[in-house]
């Protein structure tokens, strides 16, 4: 992961300048110079006050901490969005289409909720939590799809037939009369390895079935939370639904690592990608 760029005084000055109240007051001061028809008298005062404001605010420790925090959050969000794009690109067309359909359904429900939304503050907070929760679930759904694809590629009938055929050949070689002790050692070791591979395959098959059931659970939870947006669902219900739907996914990823299967680029320890936007029902492309 690339290191975060250092935040300097120029960044603080830019952030201080872009504060909405500063822009409003600055525009008002410039306009006042035009209204009173003495811009050469008013504008220098406005400029001096603006410079003083920028110097004071940009050097304030709390403001600097806020700028650094926002920048780190933005970089983390960018990293997770890039990881989501890469992960989506690894999916088969069928899995990409499945994810796209779930996301499109969420967007439709989000637009429906936004069209009937008032300006009630509590309602806006619930809407924001619903969007955040659905983003978490869409990220979990995408990761689970990728995990399911890896396991499905590993747990193929052809792989089982290959291992079983090798197992039969090794057993036949061990059963041959006159096999030397020197040969029995490597053949016995091969037999143990092949049996472990078969057991690994059985475990992968069980995990695959469990993961497919988990995918359906997450898919239905995503749509349920979005549908509840139309009825202003209890925020506690939303959080509980997210936790219940995503339970076990971390253990699935750990299982893939233990089986030496291809690692998934999921931008660990970063916020979930913003599959759905939070501003007024506008959906990110």
Image: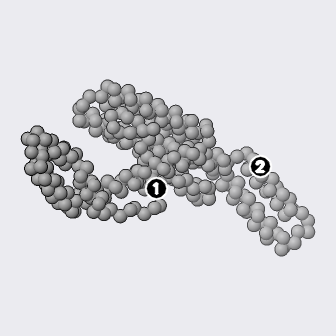
Q: Give the vertical position of 124 relative to 266 (above or below).
A: above
Q: Which mark is residue 161?
A: 2
* Quadrant placement of the C terminus: top left
Q: Residues within 10 Å of mark 1 (few under 14, many from 20)?
A: few
Q: Position of residue 93 (x, y in %)?
A: 61, 39
Picture residue at 43% right of the left edge, 29% below the top:
108
Left or right placement of residue 175 versus residue 131 in this view: right
Picture residue at 12% right of the left edge, 49% below the top:
40
Q: Residues within 10 Å of mark 2 (few under 14, many from 20)?
A: few
Viewer can see residue 205: no
Q: CA distance from mark 1 to mark 2?
A: 36 Å
Q: Position of residue 85 (x, y in %)?
A: 51, 46
Q: Secondary structure at mark 1?
A: loop
Picture residue at 46% right of the left edge, 48% below the top:
81
Q: Position of residue 96 (x, y in %)?
A: 57, 39
Viewer can see residue 272: yes
Q: Position of residue 189 (x, y in %)?
A: 75, 66
Q: Which mark is residue 268?
A: 1
Picture residue at 54% right of the left edge, 49% below the top:
86
Q: Secondary structure at mark 2?
A: helix
């Amino acid at each position: 992961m690339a290191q975060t760029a250092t935040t300097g005084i120029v960044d603080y000055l830019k952030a201080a300048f872009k504060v909405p109240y500063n822009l409003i007051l600055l525009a008002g001061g410039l306009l006042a110079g035009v209204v009173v028809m003495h811009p050469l008298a008013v504008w220098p005062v406005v400029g001096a006050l603006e410079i003083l404001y920028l110097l004071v605010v940009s050097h304030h420790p709390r403001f600097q901490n806020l700028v650094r925090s926002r920048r780190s959050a933005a970089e983390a969000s960018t990293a997770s969005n890039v990881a989501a794009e890469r992960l989506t690109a690894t999916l088969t067309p069928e899995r990409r289409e499945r994810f796209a359909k779930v996301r499109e359904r969420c967007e439709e429900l989000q637009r429906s909720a936004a069209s009937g939304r008032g300006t009630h503050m509590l309602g806006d907070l619930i809407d924001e939590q619903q969007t955040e929760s659905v983003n978490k679930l869409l990220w979990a759904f995408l990761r689970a799809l990728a995990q399911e694809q890896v396991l499905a590629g590993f747990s193929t009938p052809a792989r089982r037939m290959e291992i079983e055929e090798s197992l039969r050949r090794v057993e036949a070689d061990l059963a041959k009369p006159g096999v030397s002790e020197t040969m029995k050692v490597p053949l016995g070791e091969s037999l143990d390895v092949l049996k472990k591979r078969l057991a690994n395959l059985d475990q992968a098959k069980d995990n695959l079935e469990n993961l497919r059931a988990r995918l359906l659970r997450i898919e239905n939870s995503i749509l349920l939370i979005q549908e509840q947006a139309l009825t202003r669902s209890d925020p506690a219900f939303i959080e509980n639904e997210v936790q219940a739907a995503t339970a076990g996914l971390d253990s699935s990823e750990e299982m893939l690592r233990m089986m030496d299967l291809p690692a998934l680029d999921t931008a660990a320890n970063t916020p979930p990608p913003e599959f759905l936007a939070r501003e007024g029902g506008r959906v990110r492309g």
